[in-house]
Amino acid sequence: MGLFVSREKKGHVKNSSDYFLASKALPWWAVGASLIASNISAEQFIGMSGSGFALGLAISTYEWMAAATLLVVAIFFLPIYIKKGIYTMPGFLLDRYDTRVRTTMAVFWLLLYVFVNLTSVLYLGALSLNTILNVPMTYGIVGLALFAMLYSIYGGLKAVAWTDVVQVVFLIAGGLATTYIALQMVGSGDAWEGLGILRKEVPGHFSMILDKGEMMIPDGKGGTRDAYGDLPGLSVLIGGMWITNLSYWGFNQYITQRALAAKSLDEAQKGMIFAGFLKLLMPLIVVVPGIAALVIVNNGIDAGFIDSMKDPVTGIIKSDRAYPTLLQVLPTGLKGLAFAALTAAIVSSLASMANSTSTIFTMDIYSKYFGKASSEANQVKVGRITAVVAFIIAAIVAPALGQLDQAFQFIQEYTGFISPGVFAIFFFGVFWKKTTSNAALVGAALSIPLSVVLKIVLPDLPFLDRMGVVFLVLAALMIVISLVEGKGKDHPNSIEVNAELFKTSTEFKIGAILITGIIAALYTIFW
């Protein structure tokens, strides 16, 4: 299907808009489906199920807070992006600040996408193939990379987005099937009873806000550590969680690229609402199976299941093996559906990340420094080569992640080294006209060093709290530098923000109210 939708009319050669922004023709339902398919990958299916096994429902905060974040991005940031007609997030930084800020952040994002995002999804995907089908890790990594490259490199974002629409159907159907069977296993054939048993057997795993010392979880080495380090109490509602979510959903190329490819602002915003409703559903698909796996292990329901949960080398039960192990016990047919869902999630995310990597490199690095007079056709060629190189590097690095117990937390922590700086320069760039280019450059340059220093000096500080501290320090520095340098004047590239810019349709308002109400109800029930 990816190859089919990538075809061009006779005589038409793919240009940069076709390849990188799907010709700006995506309807709202394609935008929303592609957002979720790109976001939900092995990172969620395997990584978040693993965190569900270790932490419980509290890890759902990432999903439910994301639904609220999508509303904020749709109202306050999308109108500005679409009005400016940008291709990339670094392109916005060039428009608002200068070339230095754009290039600095482009390099940071490229490193993040290749060495954290692509690498972790390839590793987790290969782990699932290894656990379910006994495919060697190396073959799994190479196979998934080739599968994702097969259609995404030729077709660009159009191929990625339209295949995502189909893949998200399998993703949800297969995910719900796995949850149903897992609950049946716990409830001796009755899924509803199984859910009740989960609440009874592991009540601590249904607490959304964790206190210090409340829950000890596996450290991946045979010992335990405090879960508070991953989800530090109220910080998940009013602290660092907002930084990581806004950085991801509002300023992340492979997410915002879908909205930028929409037919119009209204279609993009409706797509965000659709994605928000799907995010509310995701914990049922990716977290509850992990909790079910814990009860199966604790109660010794299935000896083979417990053996499969153990690392073949160390013999230690690994949280991230929960979901692949569950797939093994599904009946024929459902196992295929669930495996198709997992594979769809993996390859759609790989394709999205690779496409965004190639977009940033081509539009913000190559076209700026190496191919200023490059033709549209040549830009598409460079984008394809970049995607291939990114896959090769990620495939080489991926096996190194084998020592982790919860890869999902690894992804969140190391993405969090960049997130405070990203959030600061975008937030002040949009909403404070006095922010200068030098202030933004300082914010971009110091995000990683400050995060590293705090991690060394305060190793017990939860990484979400560390992100909050780094953001506050960067914000203070940016405010002081801007006021001293700009002498109280507005920056010449500042953005004119007014109430008219943030008007939304009636349908959007209704959807936003429903999503907000559901989130409030969920936190009230599981506080």
Image (spheres, helix red, strand yellow):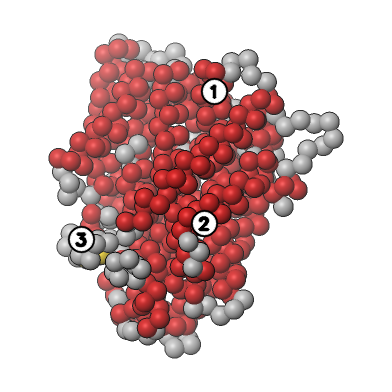
Is residue 367 shown to the viewer in this render?
Answer: yes
**Residue name at image x 46 percent, y 77 percent:** 182
Above-or-below relation of 10 to 483:
below
Q: How many labels does the image show?
A: 3
Q: What's the distance in space between the residues labelled 1 and 3, CA to CA?
A: 45 Å
Report the quarter where the C terminus lies: bottom left
Q: Quadrant of residue 292?
A: bottom left
**Residue name at image x 45 percent, y 29 percent:** 106
- Closest to the observer, 71 or 249: 249
Q: Which mark is residue 126?
A: none
Q: Residue 366 carries which label?
A: 1
State if disc 1 and disc 2 touch (CB < 8 Å). Answer: no
Three-letter code, disc 1: Tyr
Q: Mark 3 points at which residue?
A: 225
Camera-side mark, 3 or 2: 2
Q: In which quarter of the image is residue 440?
A: top left
Mark 1 falls on what kind of element? helix
